[in-house]
Image (cartoon, rainbow, N blue to C red):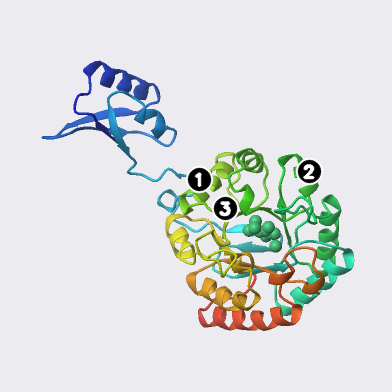
Amino acid sequence: MVIILKKDAQAESIRRLEESLKVKGISANHIEGANQNIIGLVGDTSGIDVENLLAQDCVENVRRVQEPFKKSNRKFHPDDTVIPVRNTVIGNGSLQVIAGPCSVESEEQIITTAIACKEAGATMLRGGAFKPRTSPYSFQGLGGEGIKLLVKAREETGLPIVTEIMNGADLDLFADVDVIQVGARNMQNFELLKALGKCDKPILLKRGLANTMEELLMSAEYIMAGGNMKVILCERGIRTFETMTRNTLDISAVPLLKEKSHLPICVDPSHATGIVSLIEPLSLASVVAGADALEIEVHNDPKSALSDGGQQLTPAKFAEVMAKIKDIAAYLGRHLGK
Ligand code: PEP
Ligand code: MN
């Protein structure tokens, strides 16, 4: 980190600034320029509050030269992180396809859908039990009961289960869940992230609707700072000025996050645009871009779905999409599952 000093910076103010940095174990190297004096900081600057530095009398500007995310940064951990999930793994070069309904609605619905997803080649089952809905009057999910139904569907199909948590106080209800999802709306619910940092389950962390990649990595950092290194990043589309799609899939996030971080990356092409016909091309594009996993919404009867009916694939359509996904994965020398 580099501090650019004001032209009229007082020696006493600079001395106080240096003292405050020294207490944090950071030393200051002065560089006197013809027009500007700067201080180069040496030490772990990840805990430094840039806003606080900017508030000091003598400081004109502050530049970070290192990224603020450490534990998720590939620079400090060059090897890909491989995360075990029950009898399989995410991040070893294979491709996982997490499929299932937006919401768990009934035993029949989740079991029928899970069997169809498995037959088509899905490797994990998704289903929302706690639903983050824009309207409080919309279906809010079956809660703990929904998780029990997912467990039944796992017993039936052997597919590991992925479901969203909205409140850290519910963590006990997730004891039987294989991967805990943090939804886009909770990406910066820092208390929830801290609670998940203390558990030892894989976390599927979705990018917020209007969050940068750096903010996504900083949220991963919250979980990892608590000791849980099993974080899977998920690109699910961001808000842009475009109105023809629900969100805009930021496909560049896949290779860029893989460059910046060692964590596996998943793409959700369903929430990314909300348009059924785009799920196939965007799934294929995501595999080509290097995604470790896809998360796709599939419902046994989308027309009667209690949430996101318009964007869920029928099992028949999902089977078609899966056939193409398998072809493209094979072309790239990748295989499905473990
Ligand atoms: C979901 O996957 O069920 C969901 C609500 O997605 P997102 O948080 O990405 O909107
Ligand atoms: Mn949904």
Which is closer to the viewer, label 1 or label 3? 3
* Image side of residue 163 versus residue 11, left or right: right
- Between the C-alphas of marks 1 and 2, the distance is 25 Å
Q: Percent x, y for residue 195?
A: 66, 39
**Near-viewer residue (211 or 290):** 211
Residue bearing the label numbered 1: 218
Image point (58%, 48%), residue name: 229
Alpha carbons under labels 1 and 3: distance apart: 12 Å
Crowding at dot 3, Cα within 10 Å, few <14 / some 14-19 / many 20+, comes out as: many
Name the side, left or right, on which 64 lies relative to 228: left
Residue located 71% across and 47% down the image: 166
Looking at the rendered image, the quarter that the C terminus falls into is: bottom right
* Res 271 → quadrant: bottom right
Q: Which element is circle 1 on?
A: helix
Mark 1 or mark 2, which has the lower sequence index? 2
**Ligand 1 lies under 8 Å from the Cβ of mark 1:** no
In this view of the protein, can residue 331 be seen by the observer?
yes
Mark 2 element type: helix
Picture coordinates of residue 141 (x, y %)?
Answer: 80, 55
229 to 246, vertically: above or below: above
Q: Amino acid at mark 2?
A: Asp
Q: Is residue 85 visible?
A: no
The residue identified by callout 3 is 208
Relative height, residue 314 to residue 214 (above, below): below
Outermost residue on the left side: it is 34
Amino acid type, label 3: Gly
Quadrant in which ligand 1 is drawn: bottom right
Count of marks overlaid on the render: 3
Q: Residues within 10 Å of mark 1 (few under 14, many from 20)?
A: many
Tell me if mark 2 has few (under 14), some (14-19) or many (20+) residues whose alpha carbon lies within 10 angstroms of its own: few
The secondary structure type at the circle numbered 3 is loop
Residue 172 is labelled as: 2
